[in-house]
Image (cartoon, rainbow, N blue to C red):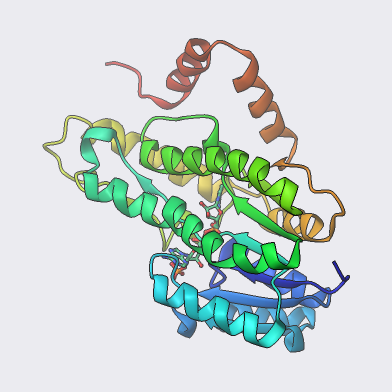
Amino acid sequence: MSLKKTILITGCSSGFGMLTAARLAAKGHQVYATMRDVSKSKPLLTEVKKRGGDNNLKIIPLDVTKPETILAAVQHISAQEKKIDVLINNAGFGIGGFFEDLSDDDYRAQFDVNFFGVLAVTRAVLPLMRGQKTGKVINVTSLASFSGTPAFSAYASSKWALEGFSECLYMELKPLGIDVAVVEPGSYRTKIFEDNARYAKYFHDPQSPYYRISRHLRKLLDDHVRKNKRDPEEVAKVLERLVEARNMPFRNIIGFRSYLRYKFVRNVPFKMYAWLVNKVLLPRKD
Ligand SMILES: NC(=O)c1ccc[n+]([C@@H]2O[C@H](COP(=O)([O-])OP(=O)(O)OC[C@H]3O[C@@H](n4cnc5c(N)ncnc54)[C@H](OP(=O)(O)O)[C@@H]3O)[C@@H](O)[C@H]2O)c1
């Protein structure tokens, strides 16, 4: 691969996608920053201007749930560049709520973006990468990909599925010269917890048996997000490092605390982990 890479990133209207696109463009890579609604491109354009990289950035529409937009985006890049070196599957969102408050449609919407969306974009890009005999696919998963918490089953299961998919894909594509990695961020204050946050169908229903506990968890989460000082740029830096690495590590956990959680979850019996999580998160019985 040449030093200047052609990179397709999904979900660049805010958060990690926006920061990563801006960083990579400033480093001189040719970045195709995609978003489902290009009228939301102002924050990215401002960020790119600030860092200097305007000439290396192109914004094109892509909704990971709309096959025609995926095809058009990949065809456009292929016609312009004749290659895609790196695909960063970043687009995603989370639906909060207990299993019985979540509808099947909630689960489907969650999987449509976080799981099937990744499959669709990857499927569209792989023929080009196979032809090149080189390429990188980087999937943004989450700490929730290997550690569950109450009220996040829709999100965790979609990311867990993505993690399993990524492991298998790594093995399938390695012999073809294509590398796969996952990036597993902990929590960062991006729009995922604010404008883009979504809740289960019955989350706000006072008749729900989980109403009281959901409100308690929502308050804990809001407090956590408000106090969260972690800089989302940390995730963009890791993505940049992976784009430029000769050999990508497969699993990329960011920060010492997240690494400790990973080790803890892997090494203590599940029931001990679950007891601790419930002790910390659930309200005390009156
Ligand atoms: N922030 C965290 O704490 C955290 C932790 C672990 C993992 N993650 C993961 O990191 C990734 C980026 O999240 P973020 O924190 O940067 O949140 P964010 O600021 O909400 O950004 C999410 C991006 O995904 C886009 N998106 C949503 N649905 C889409 C669709 N159907 N097609 C194309 N794009 C779509 C959003 O576009 P719109 O603006 O149009 O909605 C937005 O650009 C997600 O996969 C998320 O699950 C985040």
Q: Does 284 sit left or right of 250 as displayed?
A: left
Q: Residue at x 41, y 63 (%)?
A: 195
- Compared across the picture, whether 71 is left or right of 166 comes to left
Coordinates of residue 163 in the picture (x, y in percent): 56, 40
Residue 73 visible, this angle: yes
Q: Depth check: 16 or 278 in front?
A: 16
Q: Position of residue 42 (x, y in %)?
A: 56, 83
The quadrant of the rendering that contains the N terminus is bottom right
Task: Tell me where residue 43 sits by quadrant.
Answer: bottom right
Image coordinates of residue 189 in percent, x first then y, are 56, 54
Residue 169, how many percent across, how many down? 61, 45
The picture quadrant where one finds residue 263 is: top right
- Res 40 seen here: no
Q: Quadrant of the C terminus?
A: top left
41 in relation to 126, above or below: below
Residue 79 sits in quarter: bottom right
Identify the residue at horizontal 46%, vertical 85% (top origin): 39
